[in-house]
Image (spheres, helix red, strand yellow):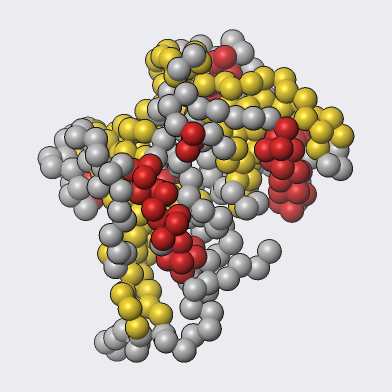
Amino acid sequence: MDLQLPPHEGAVISVVDMHTGGEPLRVIVSGYPEVRGDSVLSKRRYAREHLDHLRRFLMHEPRGHYDMYGALIVDSEIPEADLGVLFMHNDGYSTMCGHAVIALGRFAVDNKLVKEPQSPETQVNIHCPCGLVKAFVEYSGGKTGGVRFHSVPAFAFATDVTVTVEGFGEVVVDVSYGGAFYAFVSAQRFGLDVNKSRTRDLVDAATAVTKAVKSQVKLHHPTSDDLAFLYGTILTDGKDEFSSDPTANICVFAEAQVDRSPTGSGVTARVALQYHKGLIQLNQTRTFQSGATGSQFTGKAVQETKCGGFRAVVVEVAGRAFYTGVSRFVQEPDDELAHGFLLK
């Protein structure tokens, strides 16, 4: 049977779906209107203010779901960038996404967004809203494989901060930046286990922490106010001392969205935090495991640097992404749910 597009109005939006460690990525390849702005950050603002109906169209039901994640490739103002990208989720637009960078590295090489693929690795410079991220894609015999990336400067923002969390009282958290800001706390503080507890219970605890930190801790970033917001809370297994054994965590971000992967920017922030506390040294590789799926990334601090007044590190995160499908999405004129909805 030769499938044809059904009757529709407006543009047809084409996407490639991927996943990294179980976390979905919907790469938008055509049909999106021009995203205006002279920088990736200004394009992020423009998309939020003028094109947000398309984010909901692609991320929300019936085309997506509560935990869908997307990437829109845009032009970058940085000459050395191979591509720019805007990240989107159930509640808006993030500044960094490691699982997406891993997937986009493969996608860029496979779709010839870089000039000459090199073996054994091809470098792909991806301009994220937080800055330039360098991805290194395994390439052999015309095929792509695993991907590692070097982060923007990552740093511990504040450690051992006491916040009052509704339903739990006083809770001590750390706040760290890995392209986005996260609060970190052991799940044991709430009587939970990131590998075994019900996801709903983990989400409730993490969401309560996020709400508390947002209201009680003022964040700032040395380079841009657009980066100065708490993206979510990462509950850990408390195993922060260096070990060859995996350490597990689960990230709850945006509007109580659950990351299926170990969270690339979260691993970045967690490595920066461990390095700040003297728990890990340069080039010591740790394995980070998703409490949701068991999938794994590796992470290590590879270089000391500065970010404004913060002592920072460049973190290398590595993982694998896979393709899951290709879709074309349309809108029928009489569809009352065409713009999407979420069940909470």
Image side of residue 54 versus residue 125, left or right: right
Q: Quadrant of residue 156?
A: top right
Quarter the C terminus occupies = bottom right
Q: Please, is residue 271 above or below residue 7 in the view?
A: above
Quarter the N terminus occupies = bottom left
Q: Residue furthest left?
A: 116
Q: Position of residue 87 (x, y in %)?
A: 43, 49
Q: Nearer the viewer, residue 292 or 226?
A: 226
Q: Which residue corresponds to the image point at 58% horizontal and 61% vertical from the top-left? A: 66
Q: Position of residue 343 (x, y in %)?
A: 65, 68
Q: Nearer the viewer, residue 218 or 327?
A: 218
Q: Position of residue 226 (x, y in %)?
A: 47, 38
Q: Please, is residue 293 above or below residue 189 in the view?
A: below
Q: Please, is residue 117 above or below residue 343 in the view?
A: above
Image side of residue 72 versus residue 124, left or right: right
Q: Nearer the viewer, residue 181 or 262?
A: 181
Image side of residue 51 versus residue 271, left or right: left
Q: Position of residue 296 (x, y in %)?
A: 52, 38
Q: Nearer the viewer, residue 240 or 114?
A: 114
Q: Please, is residue 306 above or below residue 192 in the view?
A: above
Q: Which residue corresponds to the image point at 32% horizontal and 38% vertical from the top-left? A: 127
* Residue 299 in view here: yes
Q: Which residue corresponds to the image point at 31% horizontal and 42% vertical from the top-left? A: 39
Q: Quadrant of residue 280?
A: top right
* Residue 267 in view here: no
Q: Which residue corresponds to the image point at 46% horizontal and 13% vertical from the top-left? A: 282
